[in-house]
Amino acid sequence: MKAITSKLPQVGTTIFTVMSALAREHGAINLSQGFPNFDCDSQLKDLVSYYMKKGYNQYPPMIGVEKLRKQIAKKVNTAYGSTVDPMTDITVVAGATQGLFCAMGAFISPGDEVIIIEPAYDSYRPSVEVFGGIPIIYECSAPDYRINWEDFGKLISPKTRLILVNTPHNPTGKCFKREDWKALESLVAGTEILLLSDEVYEHLVFDEEQHQSILGFPELYQRSLAVYSFGKTFHTTGWKVGYIIGPELLMKEFRKVHQFNVFTVHSPTQYALADYLEEASHYEGLANFFQEKRDYFLEQLAHAPFTPIPSEGTYFQLAQYGHLSQENDAEYAKKLTRKYGVAVIPVSAFYSNKRDDKVVRFCFAKTKDLLKQAGERLREVGGSR
Protein backbone atom coordinates (compact mmCIF):
# COMPACT_ATOMS: atom_id res chain seq x y z
CA MET A 1 0.00 0.00 0.00
CA LYS A 2 1.24 3.49 -0.81
CA ALA A 3 2.12 5.89 1.97
CA ILE A 4 -0.88 7.76 3.32
CA THR A 5 -0.88 11.52 2.98
CA SER A 6 -2.21 12.85 6.24
CA LYS A 7 -4.74 15.66 6.22
CA LEU A 8 -3.49 16.66 9.66
CA PRO A 9 0.26 15.94 9.57
CA GLN A 10 1.07 18.16 12.55
CA VAL A 11 -1.58 16.68 14.85
CA GLY A 12 -0.48 14.28 17.57
CA THR A 13 -1.87 13.31 20.96
CA THR A 14 -3.62 16.25 22.61
CA ILE A 15 -1.99 18.00 25.56
CA PHE A 16 -5.04 17.09 27.66
CA THR A 17 -4.41 13.38 27.15
CA VAL A 18 -0.68 13.82 27.79
CA MET A 19 -1.11 15.72 31.05
CA SER A 20 -3.88 13.47 32.37
CA ALA A 21 -1.70 10.41 31.70
CA LEU A 22 1.22 12.10 33.46
CA ALA A 23 -1.03 12.90 36.41
CA ARG A 24 -2.03 9.24 36.72
CA GLU A 25 1.59 8.10 36.43
CA HIS A 26 2.75 10.37 39.26
CA GLY A 27 -0.36 10.31 41.45
CA ALA A 28 -0.85 14.04 40.87
CA ILE A 29 -4.00 16.05 41.48
CA ASN A 30 -5.41 16.56 38.00
CA LEU A 31 -6.26 20.24 37.47
CA SER A 32 -5.38 19.93 33.79
CA GLN A 33 -8.27 18.46 31.80
CA GLY A 34 -11.51 20.43 31.96
CA PHE A 35 -13.96 18.16 33.71
CA PRO A 36 -15.52 18.12 37.21
CA ASN A 37 -14.47 15.53 39.77
CA PHE A 38 -18.01 15.55 41.19
CA ASP A 39 -21.14 13.89 39.87
CA CYS A 40 -24.21 15.38 38.24
CA ASP A 41 -27.58 15.74 39.95
CA SER A 42 -29.09 12.37 40.88
CA GLN A 43 -32.45 13.64 39.61
CA LEU A 44 -31.01 13.95 36.12
CA LYS A 45 -29.54 10.45 36.26
CA ASP A 46 -32.88 9.10 37.47
CA LEU A 47 -34.62 10.76 34.51
CA VAL A 48 -32.25 9.10 32.02
CA SER A 49 -32.85 5.75 33.70
CA TYR A 50 -36.60 6.35 33.67
CA TYR A 51 -36.68 6.95 29.93
CA MET A 52 -34.45 3.96 29.24
CA LYS A 53 -36.81 1.71 31.23
CA LYS A 54 -39.83 3.26 29.49
CA GLY A 55 -38.42 2.13 26.16
CA TYR A 56 -37.15 5.41 24.68
CA ASN A 57 -34.20 3.56 23.20
CA GLN A 58 -34.61 3.90 19.43
CA TYR A 59 -33.66 6.69 17.05
CA PRO A 60 -35.06 10.10 18.01
CA PRO A 61 -35.55 12.72 15.28
CA MET A 62 -32.37 13.69 13.44
CA ILE A 63 -32.63 17.31 14.61
CA GLY A 64 -33.35 16.35 18.22
CA VAL A 65 -36.34 15.56 20.42
CA GLU A 66 -39.02 18.22 19.92
CA LYS A 67 -39.67 18.76 23.62
CA LEU A 68 -35.98 19.36 24.23
CA ARG A 69 -35.72 21.84 21.36
CA LYS A 70 -38.73 23.71 22.73
CA GLN A 71 -37.17 23.87 26.20
CA ILE A 72 -33.90 25.15 24.72
CA ALA A 73 -35.75 27.84 22.77
CA LYS A 74 -37.63 28.92 25.89
CA LYS A 75 -34.37 29.12 27.84
CA VAL A 76 -32.35 31.14 25.32
CA ASN A 77 -35.19 33.42 24.28
CA THR A 78 -35.79 34.34 27.90
CA ALA A 79 -32.10 34.81 28.66
CA TYR A 80 -31.00 36.70 25.56
CA GLY A 81 -34.13 38.34 24.20
CA SER A 82 -33.82 36.26 21.04
CA THR A 83 -36.56 34.80 18.83
CA VAL A 84 -35.13 31.35 18.18
CA ASP A 85 -37.58 28.93 16.53
CA PRO A 86 -37.32 25.41 17.99
CA MET A 87 -38.42 23.84 14.72
CA THR A 88 -36.00 25.53 12.34
CA ASP A 89 -33.19 27.06 14.40
CA ILE A 90 -32.02 24.34 16.84
CA THR A 91 -30.26 21.01 16.32
CA VAL A 92 -29.19 18.70 19.15
CA VAL A 93 -25.61 17.51 18.66
CA ALA A 94 -23.27 14.89 20.12
CA GLY A 95 -21.31 17.42 22.14
CA ALA A 96 -20.09 20.88 21.21
CA THR A 97 -16.98 19.61 19.42
CA GLN A 98 -19.11 17.59 17.01
CA GLY A 99 -21.30 20.64 16.46
CA LEU A 100 -18.27 22.79 15.69
CA PHE A 101 -16.87 20.18 13.31
CA CYS A 102 -20.12 19.82 11.37
CA ALA A 103 -20.46 23.58 11.11
CA MET A 104 -17.01 23.71 9.52
CA GLY A 105 -17.98 20.88 7.19
CA ALA A 106 -21.14 22.67 6.13
CA PHE A 107 -19.58 26.01 5.28
CA ILE A 108 -15.83 25.70 4.71
CA SER A 109 -14.52 24.89 1.23
CA PRO A 110 -10.88 24.47 0.16
CA GLY A 111 -9.12 27.81 0.14
CA ASP A 112 -11.60 29.58 2.43
CA GLU A 113 -10.00 31.62 5.19
CA VAL A 114 -11.18 31.21 8.78
CA ILE A 115 -10.07 33.69 11.45
CA ILE A 116 -9.31 32.04 14.78
CA ILE A 117 -8.57 34.00 17.94
CA GLU A 118 -5.71 32.42 19.90
CA PRO A 119 -5.14 31.05 22.44
CA ALA A 120 -7.89 28.73 21.22
CA TYR A 121 -9.50 25.40 22.03
CA ASP A 122 -7.46 22.74 20.28
CA SER A 123 -10.17 21.39 17.96
CA TYR A 124 -10.66 24.65 16.07
CA ARG A 125 -7.65 24.65 13.75
CA PRO A 126 -7.78 20.94 12.79
CA SER A 127 -11.50 21.27 12.03
CA VAL A 128 -10.73 24.06 9.59
CA GLU A 129 -7.79 22.29 7.99
CA VAL A 130 -9.47 18.92 7.45
CA PHE A 131 -11.99 20.65 5.16
CA GLY A 132 -9.28 22.51 3.25
CA GLY A 133 -9.75 25.83 4.99
CA ILE A 134 -6.89 28.19 5.77
CA PRO A 135 -6.60 29.27 9.43
CA ILE A 136 -5.82 32.97 9.86
CA ILE A 137 -4.61 33.56 13.39
CA TYR A 138 -5.20 36.61 15.58
CA GLU A 139 -3.04 36.34 18.71
CA CYS A 140 -4.01 37.67 22.11
CA SER A 141 -1.30 37.85 24.75
CA ALA A 142 -0.97 37.72 28.52
CA PRO A 143 -2.02 39.12 30.83
CA ASP A 144 -5.09 40.89 29.43
CA TYR A 145 -5.83 38.74 26.34
CA ARG A 146 -7.97 41.50 24.87
CA ILE A 147 -8.70 41.96 21.16
CA ASN A 148 -7.63 45.13 19.36
CA TRP A 149 -10.45 45.24 16.84
CA GLU A 150 -8.67 47.65 14.53
CA ASP A 151 -5.78 45.19 14.19
CA PHE A 152 -8.22 42.30 13.96
CA GLY A 153 -9.97 43.95 11.04
CA LYS A 154 -6.74 43.92 9.04
CA LEU A 155 -6.97 40.12 8.86
CA ILE A 156 -10.26 40.22 6.98
CA SER A 157 -9.86 39.62 3.26
CA PRO A 158 -12.07 38.74 0.26
CA LYS A 159 -11.29 35.08 1.11
CA THR A 160 -12.58 35.31 4.69
CA ARG A 161 -15.45 32.87 4.98
CA LEU A 162 -15.88 32.53 8.74
CA ILE A 163 -14.77 34.03 12.05
CA LEU A 164 -14.68 31.74 15.08
CA VAL A 165 -15.17 33.28 18.53
CA ASN A 166 -15.38 31.80 22.02
CA THR A 167 -16.98 33.46 25.03
CA PRO A 168 -16.61 32.82 27.93
CA HIS A 169 -13.17 31.92 26.67
CA ASN A 170 -11.18 28.75 27.16
CA PRO A 171 -8.39 28.94 28.32
CA THR A 172 -8.22 32.60 29.40
CA GLY A 173 -11.54 33.00 31.21
CA LYS A 174 -12.16 36.30 29.40
CA CYS A 175 -15.68 37.26 28.31
CA PHE A 176 -16.90 39.27 25.33
CA LYS A 177 -18.42 42.59 26.30
CA ARG A 178 -21.21 44.30 24.38
CA GLU A 179 -18.64 46.59 22.76
CA ASP A 180 -16.74 43.57 21.44
CA TRP A 181 -19.80 42.29 19.61
CA LYS A 182 -20.59 45.75 18.26
CA ALA A 183 -17.04 46.13 16.99
CA LEU A 184 -17.28 42.77 15.25
CA GLU A 185 -20.67 43.72 13.87
CA SER A 186 -19.14 46.78 12.23
CA LEU A 187 -16.31 44.73 10.71
CA VAL A 188 -18.57 42.15 9.03
CA ALA A 189 -21.34 44.52 7.93
CA GLY A 190 -21.85 44.35 4.18
CA THR A 191 -19.87 41.11 3.81
CA GLU A 192 -20.80 37.45 3.36
CA ILE A 193 -18.68 36.42 6.35
CA LEU A 194 -20.22 33.86 8.71
CA LEU A 195 -19.67 33.67 12.48
CA LEU A 196 -19.32 30.59 14.67
CA SER A 197 -19.71 31.35 18.37
CA ASP A 198 -18.58 28.77 20.93
CA GLU A 199 -20.59 29.57 24.07
CA VAL A 200 -20.35 26.32 26.02
CA TYR A 201 -19.60 28.16 29.29
CA GLU A 202 -22.58 30.52 28.90
CA HIS A 203 -23.75 30.02 32.49
CA LEU A 204 -20.31 30.46 34.05
CA VAL A 205 -19.91 34.24 34.10
CA PHE A 206 -18.77 35.77 37.37
CA ASP A 207 -18.89 38.94 39.48
CA GLU A 208 -22.54 39.67 38.67
CA GLU A 209 -21.80 40.18 34.98
CA GLN A 210 -24.13 38.73 32.34
CA HIS A 211 -23.15 36.50 29.44
CA GLN A 212 -23.25 38.47 26.20
CA SER A 213 -24.46 35.91 23.67
CA ILE A 214 -24.38 36.39 19.93
CA LEU A 215 -28.09 35.48 20.10
CA GLY A 216 -28.72 38.90 21.62
CA PHE A 217 -27.41 40.75 18.55
CA PRO A 218 -29.92 40.30 15.71
CA GLU A 219 -27.66 41.63 12.97
CA LEU A 220 -24.95 39.18 13.93
CA TYR A 221 -27.31 36.28 14.55
CA GLN A 222 -28.48 36.29 10.93
CA ARG A 223 -24.99 35.21 9.86
CA SER A 224 -24.16 33.01 12.86
CA LEU A 225 -24.22 29.59 14.44
CA ALA A 226 -23.83 29.34 18.22
CA VAL A 227 -22.73 26.18 20.01
CA TYR A 228 -23.65 25.02 23.53
CA SER A 229 -22.94 22.06 25.81
CA PHE A 230 -25.09 20.26 28.36
CA GLY A 231 -21.89 18.55 29.48
CA LYS A 232 -20.45 21.84 30.73
CA THR A 233 -23.76 23.04 32.16
CA PHE A 234 -24.84 19.93 34.05
CA HIS A 235 -21.47 18.32 34.91
CA THR A 236 -21.98 15.50 32.37
CA THR A 237 -19.02 15.87 30.02
CA GLY A 238 -19.01 12.12 29.36
CA TRP A 239 -22.53 12.18 27.94
CA LYS A 240 -21.47 14.30 24.95
CA VAL A 241 -24.76 16.12 24.34
CA GLY A 242 -25.07 19.73 23.25
CA TYR A 243 -26.93 21.86 20.76
CA ILE A 244 -26.32 24.37 18.01
CA ILE A 245 -28.50 27.39 17.20
CA GLY A 246 -28.70 29.38 13.99
CA PRO A 247 -31.13 30.95 11.52
CA GLU A 248 -33.07 28.60 9.24
CA LEU A 249 -30.99 29.32 6.14
CA LEU A 250 -27.77 28.25 7.86
CA MET A 251 -29.33 25.46 9.90
CA LYS A 252 -30.59 23.72 6.78
CA GLU A 253 -27.00 23.38 5.56
CA PHE A 254 -25.72 22.39 8.99
CA ARG A 255 -28.27 19.58 9.26
CA LYS A 256 -27.21 18.17 5.88
CA VAL A 257 -23.75 17.49 7.32
CA HIS A 258 -24.94 16.53 10.82
CA GLN A 259 -27.25 13.79 9.50
CA PHE A 260 -24.35 12.01 7.79
CA ASN A 261 -21.98 12.48 10.70
CA VAL A 262 -23.81 11.11 13.75
CA PHE A 263 -27.38 11.46 12.43
CA THR A 264 -28.84 11.81 15.91
CA VAL A 265 -28.04 11.80 19.62
CA HIS A 266 -28.71 9.45 22.55
CA SER A 267 -32.48 9.25 22.88
CA PRO A 268 -33.23 8.76 26.62
CA THR A 269 -30.76 11.50 27.56
CA GLN A 270 -32.59 13.99 25.35
CA TYR A 271 -35.94 13.24 26.97
CA ALA A 272 -34.35 13.48 30.41
CA LEU A 273 -32.76 16.85 29.63
CA ALA A 274 -36.08 18.16 28.33
CA ASP A 275 -37.70 17.42 31.68
CA TYR A 276 -34.73 18.71 33.67
CA LEU A 277 -34.71 22.06 31.84
CA GLU A 278 -38.24 22.77 33.04
CA GLU A 279 -36.73 23.93 36.33
CA ALA A 280 -34.59 27.01 35.57
CA SER A 281 -32.82 26.83 38.93
CA HIS A 282 -30.89 23.84 37.58
CA TYR A 283 -28.75 26.24 35.54
CA GLU A 284 -29.41 29.73 36.89
CA GLY A 285 -27.32 29.11 40.01
CA LEU A 286 -24.24 27.87 38.19
CA ALA A 287 -22.43 31.22 38.13
CA ASN A 288 -22.49 31.47 41.93
CA PHE A 289 -21.63 27.79 42.29
CA PHE A 290 -18.47 28.08 40.21
CA GLN A 291 -17.54 31.56 41.40
CA GLU A 292 -17.36 30.16 44.91
CA LYS A 293 -14.93 27.55 43.62
CA ARG A 294 -12.90 30.15 41.74
CA ASP A 295 -12.64 32.36 44.81
CA TYR A 296 -11.72 29.42 47.04
CA PHE A 297 -9.00 28.34 44.63
CA LEU A 298 -7.68 31.91 44.49
CA GLU A 299 -7.45 31.82 48.29
CA GLN A 300 -5.26 28.75 47.93
CA LEU A 301 -3.11 30.40 45.27
CA ALA A 302 -2.67 33.45 47.50
CA HIS A 303 -0.28 31.35 49.58
CA ALA A 304 1.57 30.04 46.50
CA PRO A 305 4.12 32.00 44.45
CA PHE A 306 2.07 32.30 41.24
CA THR A 307 0.52 35.47 39.78
CA PRO A 308 -3.14 34.76 38.91
CA ILE A 309 -4.76 36.36 35.87
CA PRO A 310 -8.40 37.34 36.59
CA SER A 311 -10.94 34.77 35.40
CA GLU A 312 -14.20 36.39 34.32
CA GLY A 313 -15.89 33.12 33.38
CA THR A 314 -15.48 29.37 32.60
CA TYR A 315 -13.99 27.07 35.23
CA PHE A 316 -10.39 27.83 34.37
CA GLN A 317 -7.83 29.95 36.18
CA LEU A 318 -4.61 31.11 34.51
CA ALA A 319 -1.48 31.97 36.45
CA GLN A 320 1.89 33.42 35.45
CA TYR A 321 5.12 31.84 36.68
CA GLY A 322 7.80 33.78 34.75
CA HIS A 323 9.11 35.33 37.96
CA LEU A 324 9.77 31.81 39.25
CA SER A 325 11.35 30.09 36.26
CA GLN A 326 12.32 30.66 32.64
CA GLU A 327 11.52 27.07 31.68
CA ASN A 328 9.11 26.83 28.78
CA ASP A 329 5.56 26.27 29.93
CA ALA A 330 5.34 22.70 28.64
CA GLU A 331 8.34 21.64 30.72
CA TYR A 332 7.19 23.68 33.68
CA ALA A 333 3.75 22.02 33.59
CA LYS A 334 5.42 18.61 33.61
CA LYS A 335 7.62 19.67 36.52
CA LEU A 336 4.59 20.78 38.53
CA THR A 337 3.05 17.37 37.86
CA ARG A 338 6.09 15.25 38.64
CA LYS A 339 7.70 17.22 41.45
CA TYR A 340 4.79 18.93 43.17
CA GLY A 341 1.91 16.61 42.32
CA VAL A 342 -0.42 19.07 40.55
CA ALA A 343 -1.16 18.63 36.84
CA VAL A 344 -1.86 21.75 34.78
CA ILE A 345 -2.03 22.71 31.10
CA PRO A 346 0.65 24.89 29.45
CA VAL A 347 -1.11 27.74 27.64
CA SER A 348 1.31 27.47 24.69
CA ALA A 349 -0.72 24.38 23.71
CA PHE A 350 -3.53 26.73 22.71
CA TYR A 351 -1.35 28.64 20.19
CA SER A 352 -0.48 27.44 16.70
CA ASN A 353 3.06 28.78 17.06
CA LYS A 354 3.37 27.53 20.66
CA ARG A 355 3.69 31.09 21.96
CA ASP A 356 5.06 30.92 25.49
CA ASP A 357 4.03 33.71 27.88
CA LYS A 358 4.99 31.63 30.93
CA VAL A 359 1.36 30.92 31.81
CA VAL A 360 -0.34 27.69 32.94
CA ARG A 361 -4.03 26.81 33.22
CA PHE A 362 -5.71 25.29 36.27
CA CYS A 363 -9.21 23.76 36.22
CA PHE A 364 -11.13 24.59 39.42
CA ALA A 365 -14.22 22.47 38.65
CA LYS A 366 -13.28 20.32 41.61
CA THR A 367 -14.44 19.67 45.14
CA LYS A 368 -13.10 21.97 47.85
CA ASP A 369 -11.07 19.25 49.48
CA LEU A 370 -9.23 18.58 46.23
CA LEU A 371 -8.62 22.30 45.64
CA LYS A 372 -7.30 22.59 49.18
CA GLN A 373 -4.92 19.67 48.64
CA ALA A 374 -3.73 21.25 45.41
CA GLY A 375 -3.17 24.56 47.17
CA GLU A 376 -1.09 22.91 49.87
CA ARG A 377 1.13 21.30 47.24
CA LEU A 378 1.47 24.49 45.22
CA ARG A 379 2.72 26.37 48.30
CA GLU A 380 5.82 24.21 48.10
CA VAL A 381 6.70 25.49 44.64
CA GLY A 382 10.03 27.33 44.54
CA GLY A 383 11.73 29.57 42.00
CA SER A 384 14.66 28.71 39.76
CA ARG A 385 15.60 31.67 37.58
Image: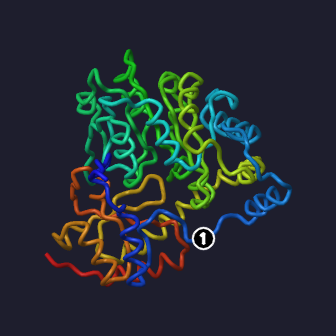
Give the x, y percent position of residue 169. Answer: 42, 49
Secondary structure of residue under mark 1: loop
Q: Is residue 144 visible?
A: no
Above or below: residue 221 compared with residue 301: above
Is residue 343 toward the left or the right of residue 280 in the image?
Answer: left
Is residue 155 toward the left or the right of residue 82 in the image?
Answer: left
Residue sitting at 54 percent across and 32 percent down? Answer: 254
The type of residue carrying mark 1 is Phe
Is residue 310 toward the left or the right of residue 71 in the image?
Answer: left
User: Residue beneath label 1, please?
Assistant: 38
The foreground one among 341 and 272 is: 272
Give the x, y percent position of residue 270. Answer: 71, 49
Residue sitting at 49 percent across and 39 percent down? Answer: 102
Residue sitting at 69 percent across and 32 percent down? Answer: 86
Badge 1 crowding class, 10 Å Cα cut-off, few under 14, some 14 to 19, many 20 or more, is few
Q: Quadrant of residue 263?
A: top right
The foreground one among 167 and 211 is: 167
